[in-house]
Amino acid sequence: MRIRSFSNALYALTVILTLSTTTACTACSSGDENNKLDNPPSSIPHLGNVNRFQRTFHALNDVHLACAHRLGVSPIANRKEAEALSSKLKNITHGEDYVIQKLTYSIPYLVRPAKELLCDIAQTFRDSLKSKGYTDHKVTVTSVLRTEADVKRLRRRNINASAKSCHRFGTTFDISWKRFKKVDTSWFAAKRKKASIPILKQVLAQVLRDKQLEKRCYVKYEVKQACFHITVRN
């Protein structure tokens, strides 16, 4: 009787321990799965996934405008007036780590914090490519400071262009996600991995995601304009 009672007790204890372990493992597994769905380790937009880019870089115009009003200059009437504000606006024509496309509706000026942010993004992008073993490229700036005259001309061409553009304050610039300039064409560069446009876009997105987390800027992913719309925060 004693042996049978001991055996029954041992069996019951084994069942309890087994059920406890199974429950714990199931809970752990469920938690990991939720983390994978809700909090991916990198939270970086997947290549080619437009929705992920839009969810990661979704700062609305009102958010950009609040920073623009706080950190920028007052809207400027024309280009001559912009050139007279050299103490507040910095020329960005010559950049070691970025190129500026031919500007039709803006001029190459930013307030100092925005220029520093641009330089930081551009340099970090090149450093990131190098660390990943890809060929060297520079980002392309597609839009910078817009005068009131520029805004009016742009709105005549594009009725969807905002009259309350953040570009009027010198705090905002656009970087293309499909135009990049290859820098090094030497024999050494040929030994590096070739970077396609999707890969370059992905690396740039990583850099911008980090700047967002550092609260350096607000970013909006623009589909039609094929650019990242960026406003400095501090």
Image (tube, helix red, strand yellow):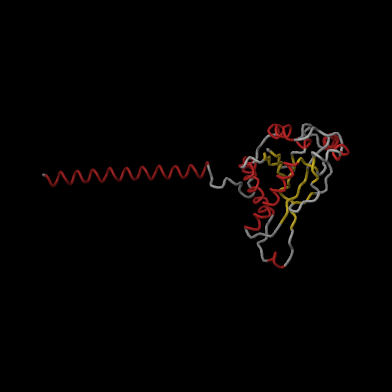
106 or 127: nearer the viewer: 127
In the figure, is residue 24 to the left or right of 80? left
In the figure, is residue 138 to the left or right of 21? right
The single residue placed furthest to the right in the displayed view is 80
The single residue placed furthest to the front in the displayed view is 87
Q: Residue at x 19, y 44 (%)?
A: 8
Query: Up-down: is 137 above or below 115?
Result: below
How many dots with numbers?
0
Q: Position of residue 135 (x, y in %)?
A: 69, 60
Q: Position of residue 132 (x, y in %)?
A: 62, 58
The quarter of the image holding the C terminus is top right
In the figure, is residue 80 to the left or right of 100? right
183 or 28: nearer the viewer: 183
Q: Position of residue 139 (x, y in %)?
A: 73, 51
The quarter of the image holding the N terminus is top left
Query: Up-down: is 199 above or below 52?
Result: below
Q: Position of residue 134 (x, y in %)?
A: 66, 59
Q: Residue at x 51, y 45 (%)?
A: 36
The single residue placed furthest to the left in the displayed view is 1
**Looking at the rendering, which quadrant does residue 137 occupy?**
bottom right
